[in-house]
Image (tube, grey):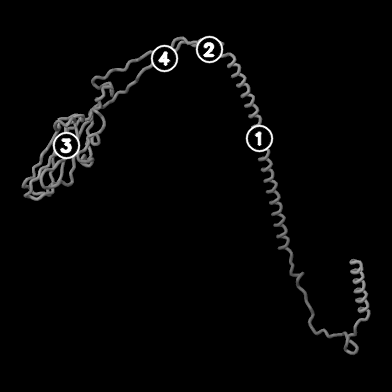
Amino acid sequence: MLKTLLKTLVLVCSVGYSYSNDLTPYQGFTGNAYNYGNPWNMNSVLPDPSGTSVNNVFYTYTPNKETSADFEVDIGNWNADKSGYVWKETDNWDGAPGGIAIIKNVPLPYVHRSAFGDGFLNTTGEGTVENATVIYTYKVDPCYNPQFDPACPGFIPPKVEEVKIEDLYVEVDVEQKEVDEDNYEKEEKESDEDKEEKEEKEKERSKMRLEQALSAVDNSALFAESFAQGQMLQQMNNAIDVNSYITATVPGGTYNETVKIDGGKLPDNKSGKRMNWATQKLHEEMVGMQYGK
């Protein structure tokens, strides 16, 4: 076994942080909370940061009732523990005509979102509400987490830590090292063989490409030669007057029959009969010899 000494290492770990140019709380407003149901959960209405504070509530609705009917509308938010209300408004519509929308703005002294329980819109008496809308305006303080920016109150600068790694002794197996060296040499040898094989294949490909290129050149030369010969023959044919070879003059007139047969009848050829009989006889003998007769 071989022991190797590793040098001492010193690691310095530091935590960086950035500075913001603007730490002004930003303003915002919600959508219609009444669309989240009645009652509505404020976790679905307000943004997530814990630095959110509500500073205003805007609501509107239209009562639907008879003028003589008694009707009241309660709207507001419970406390987080439902022991009371963060805010609550009661609109009394007794003896008032319906169909006229009400619009209200309820200011709040930047109440932290953690104080809000569920919101509600309740009715008492004979009537209903239509087109209800409840909107919250809010602000978010970026320094709700002091570590958000060094300019935030309560910011704690991060510490720079120094970590030391003491001298370490690592045991190296010499036999394993020799095995690794053998494997490395084997891989090098295989790599050289693969390289030679790739070079041979590349030479073959280059040779094939050269032969194809030469073949294309030869074909082009043959085609050009054939085309030139065809053009030459065409020019020669155009230069020859072939009319003299196809023009002929046949004398006209009447050609009378000059052969005369005595008695007006052509007699049979007796020699021909004997020849036909001899041929037929020879044929029958040949057929008989073929079938052993």
Nearer to us of marks 1 and 2 is 2
Mark 2 or mark 3, which has the lower sequence index?
A: 3
**Residue identifier under label 4:** 11
Image coordinates for residue 268, horizontal then vertical, percent: 90, 83
* Alpha carbons under labels 1 and 4: distance apart: 52 Å
Residue drawn at (63%, 26%) of the image: 190
In front here: 90 or 249? 90
Image coordinates for residue 38, horizontal then vertical, percent: 20, 40
Task: Name the image quarter holding residue 281.
Answer: bottom right
In front here: 111 or 35? 35
Q: Which mark is residue 171?
A: 2
- Residue 235 horizontal side relative to residue 137, left or right: right
* Alpha carbons under labels 2 and 3: distance apart: 72 Å
Query: Count the marks: how many?
Result: 4
- Residue 142 horizontal side relative to residue 183, left or right: left
- Residue 202 horizontal side relative to residue 24, left or right: right
Secondary structure under the numbered disc 4 in the rendered image: strand
Q: Which mark is residue 57?
A: 3
Nearer to us of marks 1 and 4 is 4
At label 1, the amino acid type is Lys
At label 3, the amino acid type is Val
Secondary structure under the numbered disc 2 in the rendered image: strand
